[in-house]
């Protein structure tokens, strides 16, 4: 076999010049030191990982080492890293990048992550891996820096796009890669046109819905691995969702994907201690809640209904359970949109009056009491911005410092808020799980002030603090107001499917098997279209039975276990 | 490991005229020489300014912690370990500082009253890297006698057993090379190429297979298309980048050694 040999001859020129000039020559000691340095850095085997010896201060878990080794040796550096949330995909990707850099196989690397995670990635790579990763903030960075962290939304836009497409990358890492499942999107097309030698796609939820999503993801990485579209259809598709030749597909996918589950890692996780706190409304609060619930019946009788759909009623009910402020802003919007007949105005006035009569927020009082007893960092999650503002004011009145956190915050502001929370404030009040990936392991108390209906969002919330690196048990407090729709939800999520105690990722699995990806809609549907409390209970029971049933099925979904 | 690094640093600073102000267990405090400050501290503006104004140079001092447990928690300094950027930088600097050498074999003058001839040898220490989607390095050290043309392997090991000096010892004289340096270098290059050719290159065959495999998959993916899109050509080029076997040869260091005839 004829292999190209690149014989570097610049050294020779130097020698001839020294010979001619009769020096100056190095000392024997420096000469030996140079050789020893080079020998220390030499890599004697094609196989195995040398990166860990370069990272003595990094705690690497066995499953992470194994992933890195597998990706490099069995998958030739092109892989989907699909460990469950909280198992350290960042560490795995960092290890692979480091290994390639030490071996000189990667010099130029691009790391595309959600905007909110850019600085965190850059920080982790430089602090944990000694990789000088630069967060892209200026245009020249693309060309002049070797390892760049950027958001895909920035990279795909001009003037960046043009420059980025010109670069030849040795390695591209894409975080939250499940967003690339649709090949018709600009993002997909952009990633496809990047020049890349090695590529890592990171996602915790690789197979959510449809078969073509996994096809698209794999084809981005390794076109043809699952055949072309037509042959893929013939070989594997029976319906959109359930594949045929499942074993064969699984085998193929597992050649490019690694997925660890918590239970596989053998790591002892700290406990989740869940406490449900039901809170009775004050008389005024209950009256307000009942008045809003009453709107439903009136709507059936009259043509000029205030509540046009059952869903907006549910929204209002949920809001009242959170705070009067949250309900107020929605109601106010409604009045502005409706044609105001005298009867309507009267009805609204009645409700506004009830809102005014509410003097205390029972949940907030309870939260305050709890925070004071905990006497440590606490994260409060609420669904509503009005509640968030109110809570911040309320806690402040009682001498408790808090910082707000929203998904919509810019990258820098998120970092700033996280830092404030760590160093100064006792409480962080978040409306969103804060987007993916923000790590708050230094905190171990979460209050679910109101519950999202999508269980995955709860997973994400808890996952912010219950992850690798959390050394203490995690306390989760769930608030629910008595005799309201919140209680139905709580019964379902807490009593029936024991959501909160579940380890991260399990539910993910169950839901994808159930094909119940939009469980939130499902629940709303039950609540909106049931005529009585009894009917709601029956349907909710049915749903929880369904979930429990799936749980018992040992088999994993198509691209499951590796 | 950490002790090795400690010893290495000690030798490195001494060899670079940078006095060690404190050397205790797990801790080193060093006064950098001007040359080393310029090389390691990355402050070109300071040195530029100083040279322009003719001020008194004030090279920095640095502290290194090679073992925090041994030196105690209170010690402050740069933590240094294998893989730390500073050690990497120091390693890197030696390539420049220790690239070319000329030495003479020392003979105890008591034993040597007659004039003795020293033979010129050209030595090359070489790193050969095999690279595809994986890689490994091979080290060889060769010496070529520039009079007789004899070649020795593991030449550096041999040198380590001798006493060598930058100055020609008393009563010794050097023989002029019959083979010029240039053709000597070329001879060694030929030998290196021969060593490579004789090696087992299963790794390259395997990489070639992986490459062809991926190419085949790629072909099936775009099979149906008469006119291949841009992404096809990108991918073809990327696969070549990824898998194509390559060998690079880099001279780490080397030079002329005048040795006694053995």
Image (cartoon, rainbow, N blue to C red):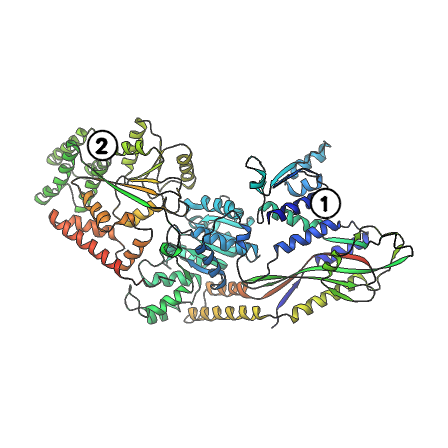
In the depicted structure, whether residue A554 falls above or below residue A331: below
Q: Residue at x 76, y 53 (%)?
A: B101
- Which mark lies nearer to you, 1 or 2? 1
- B146 sits to left or right of A429: right
Q: Which mark is residue B15?
A: 1
Q: Is residue A190 visible?
A: no
Q: Quadrant of the C terminus of chain A?
A: bottom left
Q: Nearer the viewer, residue A147 or A462?
A: A462
In the depicted structure, whether residue B109 falls above or below residue B217: above
Q: Quadrant of residue B67?
A: top right
Q: Circle 2 sits on which residue?
A: A361
Q: Nearer the viewer, residue A450 or A13?
A: A450
Q: Residue at x 17, y 55 (%)?
A: A542
Where does the image place residue A270, in percent across and percent down from the top left?
36, 46
Give me the C-alpha separation between circle 1 and circle 2: 74 Å
- B90 sits to left or right of A106: right
């Amino acid at each position: 076999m004829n292999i190209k040999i690149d014989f570097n001859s610049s050294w020779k020129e130097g020698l001839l010049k020294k010979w001619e000039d009769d020096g100056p020559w190095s000392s024997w000691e420096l000469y030996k030191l140079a050789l020893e340095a080079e020998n220390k850095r030499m890599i004697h085997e094609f196989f195995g990982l040398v990166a860990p010896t370069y990272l003595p201060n990094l705690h690497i878990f066995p499953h992470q080492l194994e992933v890195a080794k597998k990706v490099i040796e069995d998958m030739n550096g092109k892989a989907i890293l699909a460990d469950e949330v909280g198992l350290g995909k960042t560490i795995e990707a960092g290890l692979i990048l480091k290994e390639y850099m030490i071996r000189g196989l990667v010099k130029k690397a691009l790391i595309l992550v959600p905007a909110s995670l850019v600085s965190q990635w850059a920080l982790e790579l430089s602090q944990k891996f000694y990789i000088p990763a630069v967060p892209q903030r200026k245009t020249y960075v693309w060309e002049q820096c070797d390892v760049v962290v950027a958001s895909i939304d920035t990279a795909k836009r001009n003037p960046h796009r043009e420059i980025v497409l010109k670069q030849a990358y040795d390695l591209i890492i894409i975080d939250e890669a499940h967003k690339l499942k649709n090949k018709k999107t600009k993002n997909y097309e952009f990633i496809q046109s990047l020049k890349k030698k090695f590529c890592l796609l990171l996602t915790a939820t690789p197979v959510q819905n449809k078969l073509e999503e996994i096809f698209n993801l794999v084809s981005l990485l390794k076109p043809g691995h699952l055949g072309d579209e037509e042959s893929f259809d013939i070989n594997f598709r029976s319906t959109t969702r359930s594949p045929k030749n499942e074993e064969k597909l699984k085998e193929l996918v597992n050649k490019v994907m690694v997925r660890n589950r918590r239970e596989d890692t053998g790591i002892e996780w700290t406990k989740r201690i869940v406490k449900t706190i039901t809170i009775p409304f004050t008389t005024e609060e209950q009256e307000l809640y009942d008045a809003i619930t009453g709107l439903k019946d009136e709507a059936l009788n009259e043509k000029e209904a205030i509540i046009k759909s059952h869903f907006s009623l549910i929204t209002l009910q949920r809001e009242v359970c959170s705070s009067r402020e949250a309900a107020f802003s929605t109601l106010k919007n409604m009045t502005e949109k409706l044609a105001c007949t005298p009867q309507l105005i009267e009805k609204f006035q009645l409700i506004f009056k009830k809102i005014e009569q509410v003097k205390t927020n029972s949940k907030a009082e309870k939260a305050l009491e709890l925070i004071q007893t905990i006497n440590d960092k606490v994260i409060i999650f609420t669904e509503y911005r009005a509640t968030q503002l109110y809570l911040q004011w309320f806690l402040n009145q009682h001498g408790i410092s808090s910082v707000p956190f929203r998904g919509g915050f810019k990258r820098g502001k998120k970092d700033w808020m996280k830092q404030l929370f760590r160093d100064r404030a006792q409480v962080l009040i978040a409306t969103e799980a804060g987007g993916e990936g923000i790590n708050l392991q230094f905190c171990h108390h979460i209050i679910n002030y109101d519950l999202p209906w999508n269980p995955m969002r709860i997973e994400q919330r808890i996952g912010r603090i219950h992850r690798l690196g959390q050394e203490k048990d995690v306390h989760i407090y769930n608030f629910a107001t008595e005799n309201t729709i919140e209680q139905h939800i709580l019964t379902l999520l807490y009593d029936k499917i024991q959501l909160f105690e579940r380890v991260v990722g399990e539910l993910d699995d169950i839901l994808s098997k159930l094909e119940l990806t939009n469980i939130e809609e499902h629940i709303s549907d039950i609540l909106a279209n049931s005529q009585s409390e009894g009917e709601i209970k029956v349907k909710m029971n049915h749903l929880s039975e369904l979930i429990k049933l799936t749980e018992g099925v040992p088999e994993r979904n198509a691209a499951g276990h590796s | 490991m950490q002790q090795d690094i400690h010893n290495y640093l000690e030798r490195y600073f001494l060899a670079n005229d940078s006095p060690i102000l404190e050397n205790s267990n797990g801790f080193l405090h060093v006064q950098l020489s001007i040359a080393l400050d310029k090389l390691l501290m990355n402050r070109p503006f300071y040195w530029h300014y100083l040279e322009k104004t003719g001020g008194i140079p004030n090279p920095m001092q640095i502290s290194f912690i090679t073992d925090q447990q041994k030196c105690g928690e209170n010690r402050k300094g740069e933590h240094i370990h294998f893989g730390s950027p500073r050690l990497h930088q120091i390693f890197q600097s030696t390539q420049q500082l220790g690239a070319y050498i000329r030495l003479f074999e020392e003979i105890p003058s008591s034993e040597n009253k007659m004039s003795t001839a020293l033979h010129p040898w050209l030595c090359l220490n070489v790193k050969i890297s095999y690279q595809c989607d994986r890689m490994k390095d091979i080290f060889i050290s060769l010496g070529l006698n520039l009079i007789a043309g004899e070649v020795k392997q593991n030449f550096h090991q041999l040198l380590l057993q001798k006493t060598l000096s930058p100055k020609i010892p008393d009563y010794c004289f050097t023989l002029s090379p019959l083979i010029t340096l240039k053709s000597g270098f070329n001879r060694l290059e030929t030998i290196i190429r021969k060593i490579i050719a004789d090696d087992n290159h299963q790794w390259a065959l395997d990489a070639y297979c992986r490459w062809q495999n991926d190419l085949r998959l790629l072909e099936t993916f775009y099979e149906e298309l008469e006119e291949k899109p841009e992404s096809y050509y990108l991918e073809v080029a990327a696969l070549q980048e990824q898998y194509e076997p390559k060998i690079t040869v880099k001279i780490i260091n080397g030079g002329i050694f005048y040795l006694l005839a053995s």
